Image: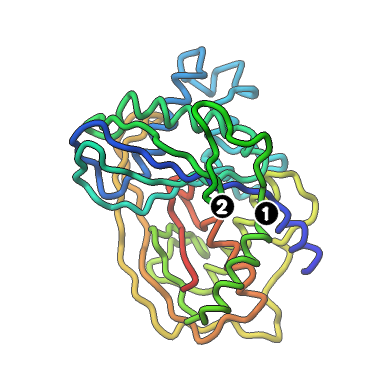
Amino acid sequence: MEHQLENALRIKYIKLHFTAAFLENTKLPAEKLSALRGGMGQMLLQANCIRDRNCERCEFEPECMVHRTLYTQCAVRPNFMTSKDSIGYILECENYEENFSEGDLLQFDLILFGKTIVYFHQYIEAFRALGKEGIGKYCSKYQIVSITDTRRKPFLAESCRSRKQHPLYTLGDYAKYRIHQIQEKGSTNRLVFQTPLTLKYRNEFLKVFQMEAIWEAVQRRIYMLECYEGMECSIYDYIWPHDQEMPIIREQVCRDIFVKRYSSTQNKKITLWGIKGYVQLDHIPEDLLLILAVGELTHIGKNTSFGFGKYRIT
């Protein structure tokens, strides 16, 4: 397992923090990630597509910038992957306010993994263009006032990067940082799902939290990132040690969450569903804590590019 983990934990990432100021009084949905993700996609298409957006019949699809940024281009494609959504990036937004006045700020994060990092400028320009076009039902216009990096240092000055070289971090760096935090503060052995979790386990979507399903989902997410990067060694071969019992859920609270969005590719409104809440475990073994810490960053389950599947070890 150690060798497998060493390979997986070398996967690089950066986290860009955006702060946008609204240019007018406006209203946005409580769940903003769908609007951010959909708007970002539209801006990438407007800037890069030279055909009719019919990707399946486009001869440029293999080299298309939109497909390299929006959709999965795994070096080794797992046989269980059917979705086109990319695992190379994740959007996060913890602002659930609906009414905004001129000058109010909205903060959101963009996490880029592995080879997606080199396309950072495409994403930034897409969000800048979205501010001019307007986001959501009321075309709310905004201006990006700052972009900072993983350690909250300025990432851009005007239109240029503030430094010639920005530090990159790995999944291992994040896991070590979080384990230190957890041990310093004292873990309560609780996993809090901050965004909806849509997770299929044994051919059925979870209606309540199950620890085995969560464990396998974190493994699978890391494995998908390995495939994305073309790594040969896989954490996915590692199973829970037979001499240790899976942590028991002593208490849990969960509720259904429905998020409505408009799909431009399907040309219709669709509803995303998941469960949200927390689980209280009897204990978290050291091996499991390491991998669960990685899962905080990568998210788990379906619709992660829309921010789904985010949890926190409290």
For marks 2 and 1 on the same chain, the one whose residue lies earlier in the sequence: 2
Quarter of the image where the N terminus is located:
bottom right
Q: Distance between the residues labelled 2 and 1?
A: 13 Å
Residue at position x 30%, y 49% from top?
31
Q: In this view, does 203 lie above or below 168?
A: below
Residue at position x 41%, y 29% from top?
265
Q: Which mark is residue 170?
A: 1
Amino acid identity at mark 1 = Thr
Q: Which of marks 2 and 1 is in front?
A: 2
Q: Residue 135 carries which label?
A: none
**Left or right of residue 87: residue 242:** right
Snapshot colouring: rainbow
Q: Name the residue under label 2.
A: 151
Amino acid identity at mark 2 = Arg
Nearer to me, 152 or 40: 152
The spot of residue 276 in percent (x, y) is 36, 64
Q: Determine which quarter of the picture holds residue 35.
A: top left
SS category of the residue bearing label 1:
strand
SS category of the residue bearing label 2:
loop
Q: Determine which quarter of the picture holds residue 257.
A: bottom left
The spot of residue 293 in percent (x, y) is 58, 66
Residue at position x 64%, y 22% from top?
63
**Left or right of residue 207: residue 68:** right
The spot of residue 108 in percent (x, y) is 41, 46
The spot of residue 6 in percent (x, y) is 77, 61
Nearer to me, 149 or 8: 149
